[in-house]
Image (cartoon, rainbow, N blue to C red):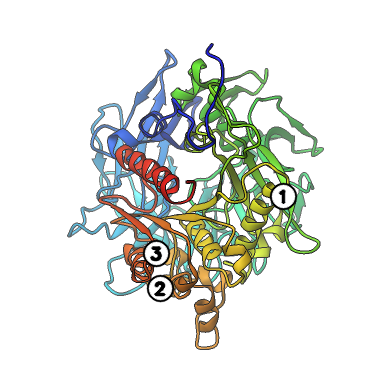
Amino acid sequence: MPLSITVPFGAWPSPITSERVATAQTTLIDVLLHEGVVYWIEGRPLEAGRHVLVRLGDDGAGVDVTPQPFSARTRVHEYGGGAVALAAGAAYFSNFADQRLYRLDGSGVPTPLTLAPASNDAVLRYADGQIDATRHLWIGIREDHRTPGAEAANTLVALGLGPAGGESVLVQGSDFYASPRLSPDGRLLAWLAWDHPDMPWTATRLWVGEFDGAAVTNAVMVAGGPGESVFQPEWSPDGLLHYVSDRSGWWNIYRREASGAAVNLCPRTAEFGRAQWGFGMSTYAFVSADQLVCTYTEDGTGKLALLNLQGGALTPFDLPFTEFSSVRASAGRIAFKAGSPTVAGAVVVLDAASGHAAIVRNTAAMADDPTLREYISTPRLIEFPTSPGETAFALFYPPANADCHGPPGSLPPLLVKCHGGPTSSASRSLDLRTQFWTSRGIAVVDVDYGGSTGYGRAYRDRLHRMWGIVDARDCGAAASYLAANGLVDAARMVITGGSAGGFTALSCLTHADPALRGLFRAGASHYGVSDPEALTRDTHKFESRYMDWLIAPYSDAGRQTYIDRSPVRNAGRIGAPVAFFQGTEDRIVPPSQTEEMVAALRRRGISALYLLFAGEQHGFRQAIHIQWALDAELYFYAALAWR
């Protein structure tokens, strides 16, 4: 092994190149388990981001199920999820290009189940389906865009799988629906509903109705309402309804007894649920009528455990992972997505009886290369002061490179990452995009600012009407904390974020407090919000009223608050260079927002890099674009912030 040499921080040569990052790491979308057979959906940058359903073969290798050019991805709510349902050896999936539902059996040729769109517009979209095998139905969510100029209509529908086909609306009237779940005997249907301006993590309602295959009748609301978020209803094998609720201040698992009473099965200051940005999310699954497997976040770390449904005993598995999702159970097997600071998102299969676990698909094979292990930075969770009496959390990644060390007495530059959502959280899994920075001698801090998930309802609610204030304050506080403790160079700090995180980054750079905006030498916004006013007028249905909760109801009285928080309206405060990265087909944050911000900076002579990527939506999925964005951001900082 060569000796470590002295190289300035930020200029370390690294084998973790942008090309290797872009081509080596697929995106693991979902894990499925049907009759003991493991499936997963992966997004492939080298196939222009195509989502492929893959089955674990008998030889331990993955076998593609969906053929080219089909992509198993739905656009319901734009964020999608729940694109595939499995039953009796067949896969039912939503295809991205036309948003039609298809059936794929042993023939390997997908057969369409829904009508072709009249134009290139995918006006009918489907998600979160379940198969009623007895009645030959697909039951799920439909999003209807057929009325020009009107808001899309979301309903719960049943679609016939037999020769006669047909489609009928089962439940309508609410703005949104999710998680239709049929009881084991097929007599009852449970589902979630919510209305503007709520989001599923602020207030949802859990309903149960009688179902005869043609209609839902006698529906009653059994949980949820104002101030309560209900997540993932599921029926146990013996026909009792379970769900996750945050009525205690934490997302805990509840059972609805035959009497109608709700029982918290494991009261705990831990999060057993998630912010439902996509469909098909699963944090627990039934191993038997007496036991379920669940994941939860406690003290900033994810865990997987067995929960005894009679006594409430929680028995964690001893596993080398810190983040879990897509938890499924079938035929004595448990499958899930997992990761850790040294393991990227992976498909893991666990034997319920023995507890033995094995990785069957690692989405970043490059990370398994033993020659790269000494270039991987392991984060530590930090808690730092923000406003008086409050603290926030972040993952701090120090620079790591086996070949290099910084000059004596010098400190590394800092990249502050603002996660999206903003109701999301910093990932606890290995992300080669973060290691791209740290292996070059650049420290990274991924901030779980107030409003993030994983720390209880009160922590999430810190962002209520405070977006652009609390998140910006906390990101600045994280940077100041690291600089004050001698871990980073206070004169070379930059800030970056995607989507809502882009808004947070821009809010720091345009903040009314000159001390906060003066912390950062440069910034970057990846498809970030720059004009919250425009977001109230020009975005998709799912988030069209989210601003009511994050900022204020948009009205004459509330408009000034939007102006005060708007980066584009306050672009005159920016003194640092900013890079912008945008997709041409982004419906969540349209390119016009970014272009207005770029123009405002250039009029003032502020350096503003703008890269517009053809064919990309909200988040980049094509390898070449991921590579270009990484390289451009690095060179931008090196030229303008770290000289």
On the image, numbered disc 3 is attached to which residue? 606
Q: Amino acid at mark 1?
A: Ala
How packed mark 3 is, by other alpha carbons closer than 10 Å (few <14, some 14-19, many 20 or more), is some
Q: Amino acid at mark 3?
A: Ile
Sooner in the amino-acid sequence: mark 2 or mark 1: 1
- Point 57% across, 32% down: residue: 338
SS at mark 3?
Answer: loop
**Mark 3–mark 1 distance (CA, rounded to whole Å):** 29 Å
Q: Residue furthest left?
A: 119
Helix, strand or loop for disc 2: helix
Q: Quadrant of residue 593?
A: bottom left
The residue positioned 65% from the left and 25% from the top of the image is: 320
User: Which quarter of the picture shows residue 72?
Assistant: top left
Q: Which residue appears at 59% of the width and 32% of the height? A: 407
Marks 2/1: CA–CA distance: 38 Å
Label disc, if present, on residue 484 of the rendered structure:
1
Question: Percent position (x, y) of residue 449?
Answer: 64, 55
Q: Earlier in the sequence, mark 3 or mark 1?
A: 1
Q: Which residue is mark 2?
A: 534
Please provide percent x and percent y for residue 204: 59, 62
Q: In front: mark 2 or mark 1?
A: 1
> Residue 351 placed where, x, y %?
61, 21
Q: Nearer the viewer, residue 162 or 332?
A: 332
Compared with residue 405, is residue 186 higher up or lower down, i.e. above or below?
below
Between marks 2 and 3, how big is the CA–CA gap? Answer: 23 Å
Q: Which quadrant is home to the N terminus?
A: top right
Kindly identify the amino acid type of the residue bearing the numbered disc 2.
Answer: Ala
